Every structure is written in structure tokens, then in C-alpha cells.
Image: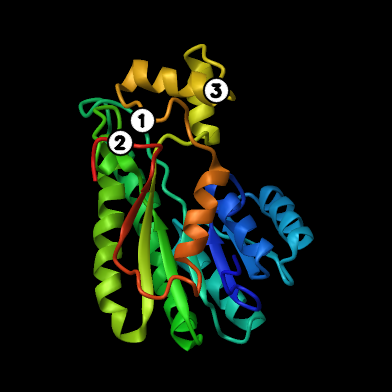
Amino acid sequence: MDLGFGGAAAAVVGGGRGMGFATAQCLADDGARVAVIGRSKDVLETAASDLARRGSPDAIAIVADTGDAEQVERAFAEIGERWDGELNVLINTVGPGAAGDFEELTDGQWQEAFDAGVMGMVRCVRAALPLLRKAEWARIVNFSAHSTQRQSTRLPAYTAAKAAVNSVSKNLSLLLAKDEIMVNVVSPGSISSEALVGWAESVGVDGSDPYQLMAAIDEHFGHPAHLPRAGLPSEIGPVAAFLASRRNSYMTGANINVDGGSDFT
């Protein structure tokens, strides 16, 4: 399906790895100009080279820490200068947080979870809005997590931050409706990210095997999916790409679960 990205300008925050990179690849495959934003220059440059090979006409790597408002402002100023002051798509995928029981987590770990998971997104949206408003059409997609609906006692700070992403996104969908800028959320389930694979290996499981990975998640967290395996980043990218596309012409304020099946709606 042609998603209408030909000639569009898109920024993917956290686009160098994992689900962000998989999403950026979908945009590049459909002809979008894609900027990947993150902290690791080497990772971003490798990702941008891949996107260019896939068909992105002006793929670029921009190094910026979303924890620093000035760096975020500079990143989007660079995008504006390069792409005539317009941006059609903003996708925010960043949001790490420390794992640990409630009584183990320090104030610093809670603050880190909220700064990375919520304020990083807020800074990027704030900096991108002038460019999004100038474009003929625009979409925002923020990444949350299914743990906001299926709680884990090992992830209270991460989950709380992601719940805040849901709330801010819903508010933005209302605020920006008058501009016809659609704002939606993707909530991945257990996806074979670097972090999850690394955790599996730390407990003696082959994290590269999605079936073994899901079995470990069931054993340690009691959160199996209906499907017997973990998901892949490549299974998240197309969903986020649709929400970010011109083909999505009437969905806003939605939270889409991509979790292999669950007991919540």
C-alpha cells in the first residue's frame, strides 16, 4: 500500500535502533525524507545509510539528547533549515526506565524515568510544532507500553512514565485537532528489543529465540501473550508508519496495542 510518504519529511526520535529504526525503515521504503535523532552518532549514521539505500531521498542523522532542551531545539532547527521549515511526521520512541520493586527505586531513578519517558517527548513535540503546523499535513506518533494496562511490580516508574505519555498524547490530540494534526499512541507488548534480549540472557535464556523469550516473560513476570512468542521490532514499524501516514485521515487520540494478544482492551 502506498502510504503517501513520497516527498514527506519525518523525524524519528530514537530511530537508530529497535522499534524506532524499524519504523524509520517503513517510512524510507515509502519515499519519505527521514531524520533519525538520538545520542549515538555511529548508530545513527549507520541507520541513516540504511535508510538512504532503502529510498529515503535525504536521510540524515542528528545527534541530540532529549534530556537537554537546548539540544532538542537545535535538532529541530537543523531539520527546519534543511527541509524548508516543514515537518510532516514526528515519531517519539524513546523512554527507558530502571526496573525494580517500588521500595528499591530511588528518587533519581523515578526522575530519570519521567525525564526520559515523558519530558523527552514533550521537548520534541514542543520544538517540532512550528514545523508541523507549517506543513500541508502532519502526524505525531508516541510510543507507550502495554504495561500501562497490565501492571508489573518490577516496572512502577517506567509504567507511570508511559501512562503519562498516554495522557499527554490524548491532550495533544484535542489541542491539535483544530490544526488537523493527528496524535496517536502505539503500545507495544513484549518485543525483542536489545534491552529485553539482554535481560533474557541475564537469566540464562536465549533471548534471540522469540519463543524462549516469551516463555521467560511468562515465568518471571506472569505476562504471556496469546501468541506463544515475543514480537519483533519489524512487526511494530508498519503499525506506527500507518498512524503517521496520510492514509490515516481520521484516527486521532487512539492507543493501539500491538502485543500478540492480551486480556485487556
Q: Residue furthest front?
A: 1
Q: Quick one: which residue is furthest to the right in this view?
A: 53
Is any atom of residue 129 visible in this view? yes
Residue drawn at the location 46% of the way across and 60% of the way down: 68
Residue 77: percent from left, percent from top: 56, 77
Above-or-below relation of 169 to 111: below
Quarter of the rendering containing residue 234? top right
Q: Which residue is mark 2?
A: 262
- Residue 252 vs 13, above or below: the answer is below
Question: For mark 1, does the 10 Å Cα neighbourhood hold few (<14), some (14 to 19), or many (20 or more) residues?
Answer: few
Q: Earlier in the sequence, mark 3 or mark 2?
A: 3
Which amino acid lies under the numbered mark 3 shown in the image of this protein? Gly
The answer to whether mark 1 and mark 3 are in CB contact below 8 A is: no
Residue named by callout 1 = 226
CA distance for labels 3 and 2: 21 Å
- Is 156 positioned to the left or the right of 126 in the image? left
